[in-house]
Amino acid sequence: MLEEMREPTPRGRATWYPSSVKALLDRAERMGIGTQGASSASLGNGDQVGSRSAAGR
């Protein structure tokens, strides 16, 4: 989805990897910024992100 929006990675590249997205979501969670609305299916990371964020709610 980020690539479709032409949103660059933090380092300015065009290709987003699931680990990069997960790292940013984890960082936002630690900062107290909610990740509501982010679905694991749209992240392409399967159950890993979905099960983790659901457990924290």
Image (cartoon, grey):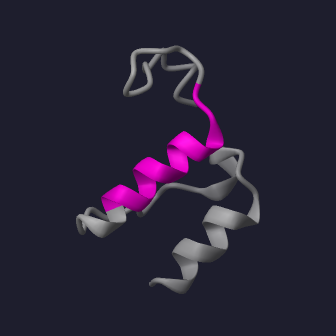
Q: Name above or below for residue 35 compared with residue 14.
A: below
- State the residue in front, 11 or 29: 11
Residue sticking out furthest to the front: 11
> What is the total number of numbered labels drawn onto the structure image?
0
Quadrant (top left/top right/bottom left/bottom right) for the N terminus: top right
Q: Is residue 23 magenta?
A: yes
Q: Name above or below for residue 18 compared with residue 10.
A: below
Going by the image, does 53 lie left or right of 35? right
Q: Position of residue 4 (x, y in %)?
A: 58, 19
Q: Is residue 38 magenta?
A: no
Q: Residue at x 53, y 52 (%)?
A: 22
Q: Residue at x 40, y 15 (%)?
A: 12
Q: Residue at x 45, y 84 (%)?
A: 57
Residue 29 falls in image quadrant: bottom left
Q: Residue at x 62, y 63 (%)?
A: 49
Going by the image, does 18 lie left or right of 6? right
Q: Position of residue 26 (x, y in %)?
A: 43, 60
Magenta span:
16-28
Q: Position of residue 46 (x, y in %)?
A: 76, 57
Q: Position of residue 27 (x, y in %)?
A: 35, 57
Residue 31 falls in image quadrant: bottom left
Magenta span main SS: helix
Q: Name above or below for residue 31 compared with residue 43.
A: below
